[in-house]
Amino acid sequence: MIEARHLRVLRAVAATGSFSAAGRELGCSQPAVSQQMKALEASVGTPLLIRGAREMRLTQAGEALVRHAAGILAGLTAAEEEVAAIAGLRAGRVRLVSFPSGSSTLVPTALAALRAAHPGTRVSLEEAEPPESVEKLRAGDCDIALAFRYEGAAGAEEWDDLVVRPLLVDRLVGLVPEGHRLAGAHSVDLGELAQEPWIAGCPRCRGQLVEACESAGFTPRIDFATDDYPAVVGLVGAGLGVAVLPQLAIEPVRPRGVRPVTLEPAVRREIVALTLPDLAQVPAVAETLGELARAAVRQESAATGEAGASGALHG
């Protein structure tokens, strides 16, 4: 294998005409130059220099290698500079996949902070719900996946091969129309909503709703189902049913005509950022994970403050 340091020595010998002059140019001894030239010739399997009593000249193979050395060394220098820029966060790219309510709450705050601190780092965003987002991470289609899992759900080991960065715990909140009989309640047992028509959210949230209702002793009558959280809120506000949504999904929406109620027993989901072990060592990825964690802290603080002001509870 040809080493870059050997190519640099060969170029210096070709330019100066002797080992001693090449050594002075490179800042090393004449024997060191001679030793590295012998190593290079051994690597390529053919002589590169013709050593005469008064002069030293290149063989045909030596001339060919010197001709290619300039481009090879220039390419290596450019690569070293680019890697140094990425390592120093002056450049780099992070591909992020997030579920919608994470995209509208945690992601904007995190990416704004990242851009302010490291304007050379570019982040792309794509939306996907878990487990699709986790599959994209394992397939190499993204660098970070924002995901969630419900407390007590089976399959906790499904992320054992990934780096898991916990962000926050998001509590499910009940939504009822303003004129509903339970709109003023401090907390509501899920069983009290057994006879209500329901509006369901995304497929995974829908599954969790059915599971929670069945644990409370009833099967929900789902009249409407939509992946669009503002549509869920709008349908509840129009008096067409009740719903259960994650707190994180409600916060970006203006819930007109809707009253949030605390559900008992509490149902929570854990919000995490996932990446692969090797990717966790990449500076731009590590910094993005850090900003997501800081955004989660700010999100929880803001939600706690708003809940205190409105009398609603947030878990």
Image (cartoon, rainbow, N blue to C red):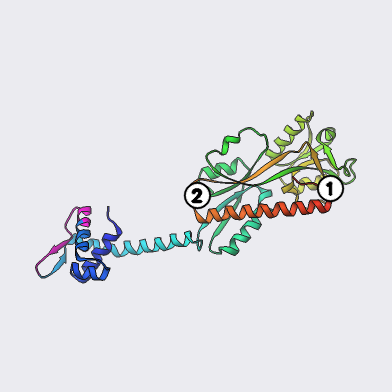
Q: Is mark 1 in CB contact (under 8 Å) with mark 2?
A: no
For residue 85, say whether it is visible.
Answer: yes
User: Which is nearer the eye, 164 or 67?
Assistant: 164
Q: Nearer the viewer, residue 278 or 68?
A: 278
In front: label 1 or label 2: 2
Extreme residue in the left direction: 53
Residue behind mark 1: 258
**Which residue in the structure is indicated by mark 2?**
279
Confirm whether residue 252 shows in the render.
no
Q: Amino acid at mark 2?
A: Leu
Q: Residues within 10 Å of mark 1 (few under 14, many from 20)?
A: many
Region rendered in magenta: 39-53
**Circle 1: residue type:** Val
What is the x, y in percent for residue 6? 26, 60
Residue that extends furthest to the top in the rendered view of this protein: 217
Q: Is residue 107 left or right of residue 257?
A: left
Residue 107 image offset from top left, x and y in percent? 64, 54
